[in-house]
Amino acid sequence: MLKKKKSGKKKEAEEIKKIAEMANFIYIRQKGPYGNGTPVLNAKHLIGNEPFAMLWGDDLFFGKTPRLKQLMQVYDKYSDPVINAVAIDDEGTKKYGVIDGQEIEPRVFQVKSVVEKPGPKKAPSRLGAVGGFILTPDIFEILEKTPLGKGGELWLVDAIFTLSKKRPLYACQVDNIYYDIGSPAGLLKANIEISKFKKNEFD
């Protein structure tokens, strides 16, 4: 930012300052077993007794309404954990957790269970748990007691399933275009398709 000020780029410097002031960024070194439950547990001391969002860094969602806002709207209405959900095909049932639930209003489901990567024959639906969650702080105590699962890893979905036995769990099928950029092919596809979007398409 200092370099931009010296070069006379005051407008750019102010934009950088504005972005930096939008949020506090805290970095945590992950300690514990492999698995996507461990980073959540590592953040316990920062989150405290508040609901929080967990979002994957290799998922992109494009739409008029941000996907996190859609999840928050469901949480604000029901005050219980919310899963980000998208429609998936047969191949998706091998890559994602699949939701077994009942639609209670358009795009909102009450979840019975989430089956981790069951494959097309055993999948209870074609609705995938993809892109993150809004969770409540009672997930921490459950994670601490959750045994290691498949591959000797601590799976967040196992803890969420336990949580669903104690309180309602919802899924929001977000109204967005979804890109999985966790692979070179997915990243390339996203770049190609996003480059074709009109400038005001999602305004």
Image (spheres, grey):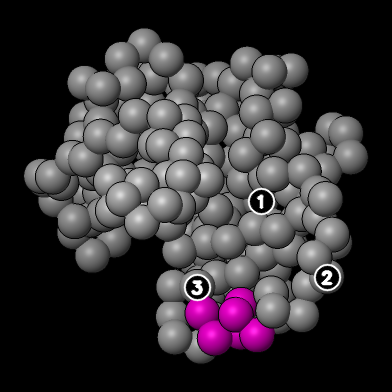
Q: Earlier in the sequence, mark 3 or mark 1?
A: 1
Give the residue pinned by disc 3: 181
Classify 140 as above or below 33. above
Q: Does the residue at mark 2 contact the one at mark 3 (Cβ under 8 Å)? A: no
Crowd band around label 1 with a 10 angstrom C-alpha radius: few (<14), some (14–19), many (20+) = many
The amino acid pointed to by label 3 is: Ile
Crowd band around label 3 with a 10 angstrom C-alpha radius: few (<14), some (14–19), many (20+) = some
Residue 87 location (% of width, % of height): 74, 62
Q: Earlier in the sequence, mark 2 or mark 3?
A: 3
Q: Nearer the viewer, residue 8 or 34?
A: 8
The amino acid pointed to by label 1 is: Ala
Numbered badge on residue 85: 1
Residue placed at 88% from the left, 34% from the top? 105
Residue placed at 39% from the left, 19% from the top? 137
Q: Secondary structure at mark 1?
A: strand
Give the residue pinned by disc 2: 198
Magenta includes 121? no
Q: Magenta segment, which residues?
A: 187-192
